[in-house]
Image: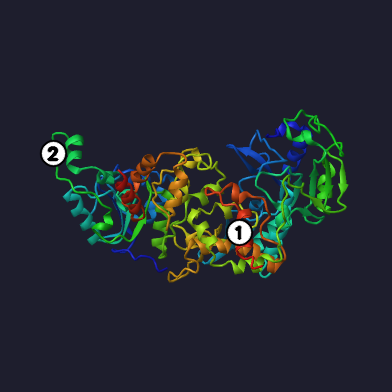
């Protein structure tokens, strides 16, 4: 289960050292949840690097749920400058892959200044995963990363004792297989520099790092075909069936590492010549998302909104960026009160559009 | 600035009124703490019985009305306030949806008078309804109590001449962003997915399931919600939960009708 923050004293010391110069986020326990939290903000961070998903993805470090874009006062506009000194530690392969795609998405067409300042100044460090229930990265093509997709990667493979309650030894005393102890793999110059003070042997990345194969790995998805299949499925009854179950709560998009839609709101002060503009996460699953001035709504029904979510991920992002906008992490399924499983949705899409 | 222009020059004249309720919404103005000092400098709160000894009559630029008219004199007051006010805001779930007093609709009024007001059977009481039944309501600030954030958003918006941006989406969005434990996934009957955000997710943030005091989201999927929620509670208890704060919300009526058909 949870791996004690103190169980690896050298790792703890290293992260605390880094926290003196950077904002360092690690997945740590809070109120029964795993949450990316800042090292140094709580005394007893308990984190499990190798398993369990966080509530919000690491994306929140670069695209915060709420951020000020500018404030204004008496005709003067003061732009908000995003911070650019964040290290996020502990991303799994699927999330590193999602980060690459999200960054590509925020760069193409109209570059997103606030996101890119944070992301380009940030450092991301991955960690081996042990698979989480309901995840399926091998189906969406987000099961491997190459140097450049990450700055550092803490490789725990061959070190199975890491997951259990630590003993203070580097490998937790578990049975060792091919790799005797954790090692750091550098995927960038910034990562290499950071690792100089790390308590692990350092190697340079030589090739792709792959997520472990799912125990019950089933068929892969025809990602190239999915755009046409999703398009053809518009109006199919599978979307109405989903709409009957869906509560429209928005959880699925809020926890998604590849959702990025936002809205802005202007707030004014009690002195009306002062105020600020905020950008906040939005969700295409909410009724007001596609409502425009005058009251028209481009997606009035829940079934259209659910189709839209899948079409954005498997049709639009696949067509514009060459990758599915779904990392396969399974967070949307895990946090869905109505148990809507994207694996089942895609299976249904494939079935209803199978004209052969 | 194209703000609401004050009726009498100078600052906007604001009135805060309580009809039948526990007056908790009025109290929220005092709970604004530091913001309260800034607020009373920015607007002129001329009517506020909980905080002022001497209260003025209209005209008002903004009136916040909490509670429901449960006596004829309260109804007369409500109508008088409407006549002398530019923007009238229902403050809280009583004035918006009947609130807790509207629980009377699930009982016989004669019985209630007999059991609750023993010896006062001649009490001159009205059936309670949201204030929109009697007067035009320009804004609805939901919740039990209304949220401080929405009070400030409303006042600052009206000063600047923009529409207040009150949240219409479900609690879950704000709750997930806070990275709270999901009580619904733990099997508790949390009304978050079908209840409007805006309170700051007060209850689920301390481990208490949402009681739905802010009323339904737009077009809530109640059929699916009931199926999911009854995994953590019984159907009668769930209906009672919906009846607690916002029983006169139009979105709930079909559900209550079906329930009446069953019992």
Write down the residue under mark 2: B121
In the image, residue B55 sits, relative to residue A306, either above or below, namely: above
Q: Mark 2 lies on which chain?
A: B
Q: In this view, does B88 lie to the left or right of B217?
A: left
Q: Regarding mark 1 in the picture, which secondary structure is present there?
A: helix
Task: Say which residue label 1 marks.
Answer: A348
Residue sitting at x 20%, y 50%: B74
Answer left or right for A288 relative to B139: right
Give the residue at x 69% y 69%: A320
Say whether residue A71 is visible: no
> Residue A126: x and y, percent?
75, 47
Q: How far apart are marks 2 and 1 (CA)?
A: 63 Å
Q: Quadrant of residue A230?
A: bottom right
Q: Residue at x 50, y 55 (%)?
A: A248
- In the image, farthest residue toward the top: A167
| Element class at badge 2 | loop
Asked whether the residues under the numbered discs 2 and 1 touch, taking CB atoms below 8 Å apart as contact, a structural biologist would say no
Q: Which part of the image, by quadrant, shows the C terminus of chain B?
A: top left
């Amino acid at each position: 289960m949870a791996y004690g923050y103190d169980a690896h004293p050298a790792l703890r010391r290293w992260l605390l050292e880094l926290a003196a110069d950077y904002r360092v986020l690690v997945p740590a326990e809070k109120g029964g949840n795993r949450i990316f939290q800042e090292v140094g903000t709580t005394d007893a961070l308990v984190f499990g690097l190798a398993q369990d998903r966080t509530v919000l993805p690491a994306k929140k470090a670069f695209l915060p749920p709420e951020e000020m874009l500018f404030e204004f006062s008496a005709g003067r506009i003061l732009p908000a400058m995003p911070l650019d000194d964040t290290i996020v530690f502990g991303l799994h392969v699927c999330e590193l892959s999602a980060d690459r795609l999200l960054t590509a998405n925020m760069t193409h067409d109209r570059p997103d200044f606030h996101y890119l300042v944070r992301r380009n100044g940030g450092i991301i460090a991955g960690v081996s995963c042990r698979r989480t229930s309901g995840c399926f990265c091998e189906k969406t093509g987000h099961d491997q990363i190459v140097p450049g997709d990450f700055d550092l990667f803490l490789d725990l493979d061959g070190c199975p004792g890491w997951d259990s309650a630590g003993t203070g030894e580097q490998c937790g005393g578990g049975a060792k297989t091919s790799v005797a102890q954790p090692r750091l793999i550098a995927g960038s110059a910034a990562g290499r520099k950071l690792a100089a003070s790390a308590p692990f042997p350092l190697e340079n990345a030589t090739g792709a790092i792959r997520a472990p194969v799912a125990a019950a790995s089933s068929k892969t998805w025809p990602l190239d075909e999915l755009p046409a299949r999703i398009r053809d499925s518009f109006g199919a009854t599978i979307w109405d069936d989903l709409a009957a179950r869906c509560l429209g709560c928005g959880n699925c998009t809020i926890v998604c590492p590849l959702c990025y839609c936002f809205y802005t709101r202007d707030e004014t002060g009690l002195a009306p010549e002062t105020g600020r503009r905020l950008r906040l996460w939005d969700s295409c699953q909410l009724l007001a998302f596609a409502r425009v001035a005058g009251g028209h709504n481009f997606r009035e029904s829940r079934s259209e909104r659910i189709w839209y979510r899948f079409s954005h991920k498997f049709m639009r992002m696949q067509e514009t960026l060459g990758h599915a906008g779904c990392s396969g992490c399974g967070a949307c399924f895990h946090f869905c009160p109505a148990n809507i499983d994207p694996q089942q949705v895609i299976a249904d899409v494939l079935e209803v559009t199978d004209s052969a | 600035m194209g703000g609401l222009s004050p009726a009498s020059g100078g600052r906007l004249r604001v009135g805060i009124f309580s009809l039948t309720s526990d007056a908790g919404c009025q109290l929220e103005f005092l709970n604004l703490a530091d913001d309260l000092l800034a607020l009373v400098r920015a607007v002129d709160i001329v009517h506020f019985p909980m905080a002022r000894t001497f209260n003025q009559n209209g005209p008002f630029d903004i009136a916040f009305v909490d509670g429901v008219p449960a006596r004829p004199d309260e109804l007369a007051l409500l109508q008088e306030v409407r006549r002398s006010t530019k923007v009238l805001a229902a403050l809280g779930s009583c004035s918006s949806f009947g609130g807790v007093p509207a629980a009377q609709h699930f009982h016989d009024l004669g019985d209630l008078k007999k059991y609750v007001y023993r010896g006062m059977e001649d009490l001159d009481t009205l059936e309670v309804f949201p204030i929109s039944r009697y007067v035009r309501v320009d804004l609805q600030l939901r919740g039990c109590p209304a949220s401080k954030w929405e009070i400030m958003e409303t006042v600052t918006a009206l000063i600047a001449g923009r529409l207040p941006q009150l949240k219409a989406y479900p609690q879950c969005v704000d709750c997930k962003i806070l990275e709270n434990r999901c009580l619904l996934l733990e099997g508790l009957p949390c009304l978050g997915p079908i209840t409007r955000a805006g309170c700051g997710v007060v209850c689920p943030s301390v481990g208490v399931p949402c009681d739905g005091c802010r009323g339904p989201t737009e077009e809530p999927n109640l059929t699916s919600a009931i199926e999911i929620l009854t995994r953590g509670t019984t159907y009668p208890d769930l209906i009672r939960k919906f009846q607690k704060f916002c029983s006169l919300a139009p979105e709930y009526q079909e559900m209550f009708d079906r329930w009446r058909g069953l019992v």
